[in-house]
Amino acid sequence: MLSPKIIKHLSKLEQKKYRAEVKEFVVEGIKGVAEALNSEFEIALVIMEGSRRDEPEFASILKLTQHTEVAVEFCGRKDVGFIK
């Protein structure tokens, strides 16, 4: 489950003004997250549905985060629905 602080921050990132202010944005999807992890961008956090972590596509993302030392938060299905 995501902390209320993370949920609040993600909600604020829906606003263009806030994204510009904090210089952050959200990337969604396997391909987009993989590309971000392989880029020069500084990745703050990867959020993944915990029940899917063993699926090959998600496991490859986890492997990429280990090489980059990016923090990973696992959430439930309820949280994933909120993020979108």
Image (tube, rainbow, N blue to C red):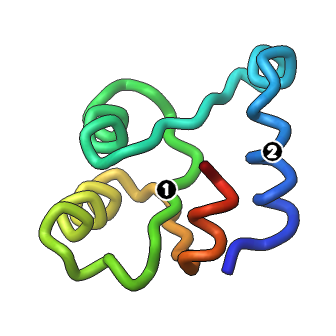
Residue 7 lies in what quarter of the image?
bottom right
Q: Position of residue 29 (x, y in %)?
A: 36, 45
Whole-percent x and y of residue 50?
Answer: 44, 80
Q: Nearer the viewer, residue 63 or 84?
A: 84
Q: Circle 2 sits on which residue?
A: 11
The single residue placed furthest to the left in the displayed view is 56
Look at the numbered disc 1 and give the secondary structure of its residue. strand
Q: Residue at x 48, y 36 (%)?
A: 27
In the rendered image, the quadrant that contains the N terminus is bottom right
For residue 21, which quarter of the picture?
top right
Determine the secondary structure under disc 2: helix
Left or right: 16, with 35 as reference point:
right
Residue mark closest to the camera, 1 vs 2? 2
Q: Residue at x 77, y 15 (%)?
A: 20
In the image, is 7 to the left or to the right of 83?
right
Image coordinates for residue 38, horizontal then vertical, percent: 26, 35
Badge 2: how crowded within 10 Å, few (<14), some, or many (20+)?
some
Type of the residue with mark 1? Val
Numbered circle sitting on residue 46: 1
Q: Position of residue 40 (x, y in %)?
A: 37, 25
Kindly indicate the quadrant of the structure image that contains residue 16: top right
Using the numbered discs, state the Cα–Cα distance from disc 1 to disc 2 in whole angstroms: 16 Å
Mark 1 closeness class: few <14, some 14–19, many ≥20 residues within 10 Å:
some
Which residue lies at the image location 81% right of the left edge and 25% below the top edge? 15
